[in-house]
Image (spheres, grey):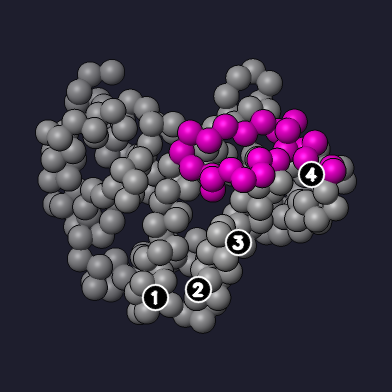
Amino acid sequence: MNQTTLFAETVRLLLEGRIICAISHESSYDYLEQDHHFQAVDEFLQKIERKLARTTDHKAFFTVYLIPNEDSADKAIRNQFKEVVLHLESLVKFLSLCRVSQPGAEPLSAGSVLYESELLSAIEQSSAAQQLLDDLAKGRFVHSNATDGKGKLKTLMQRLIEHGYLVSVGRSGAHYIATAKWSWLYDTMSFIQAHEGYQEEQVQLETDSAQQEML
């Protein structure tokens, strides 16, 4: 892919709201890692009142509005946070399931490896984990019609892929790597908590609950 095509592809992904990291979009991530490419993309985005940003751990790139006080931008930001809150409880429950299979492990982050068989085995040995999976399966994030644990977990992992939190690797489809969208999620949670202008009561309660779950 030549530089012009890569520039166009990278900008397209950013304007679609994608979180670009080495796991999800390696070529675009490597492209933005070069300062002059970062600057070129940022200058282009500023012409349409956007800005190129990075997560605090520098593992992902994404766009933000340049003038967040404008009505259209403010609405978009609120909608973005509303989507986070909508899915936050389910994402926190998934993090809890990951801790069941990997006790003492750090919270999920870019590059974390997950095996469906290990998760399922750990879940089957814990009634609390089985309840978490059942709750997730019934929720609007997963909305699975499966009746067995394997089917529910498979649907859960597929939803996480669809929302950009995981990528599937290998031919079996049961081996996953976490993307840096988790970094973006943690940053967004911190931003919501720090800016009271966006803290409706539900946002605050969900965020506090999530942070407690991850401690």
Magenta span contains residue 110:
yes
Return the mark for residue 213. Answer: 3
Q: Residue at x 27, y 39 (%)?
A: 11
Q: Using the numbered discs, state the Cα–Cα distance from disc 2 to disc 1 in whole angstroms.
A: 8 Å
- Which amino acid type is shown beneath numbered disc 4? Ile
Instruction: Give SS at disc 2.
Output: helix
What mark, if any, has residue 211 been given in the picture? none
Circles 2 and 1: CB atoms closer than 8 Å: yes
Q: Earlier in the sequence, mark 1 or mark 3?
A: 1
Cα distance between the residues tagged 4 and 2:
29 Å
Can residue 146 be seen at all in this image of the molecule? no
Q: Residues within 10 Å of mark 2 (few under 14, many from 20)?
A: many
Q: Which residue is mark 4?
A: 123
Residue at horizontal 44 percent and vertical 31 percent from the top: 23
Q: Give how far across and how far down residue 211 sits, in percent.
A: 53, 64
What residue is pinned by disc 1? 198
Q: Is residue 85 above or below residue 143?
A: below
Residue at label 2? 203
From the top left corner, tell me how far across and down residue 181 is, in percent: 45, 46
Q: Quarter of the image holding residue 34?
A: top left
Residue furthest out toward the front: 104
Mark found first going from the N terminus, 4 or 2: 4
Q: Residue 55, relative to residue 203: is it above or below?
A: above
Q: Is residue 104 visible?
A: yes
- Secondary structure state at the residue bearing disc 3: helix
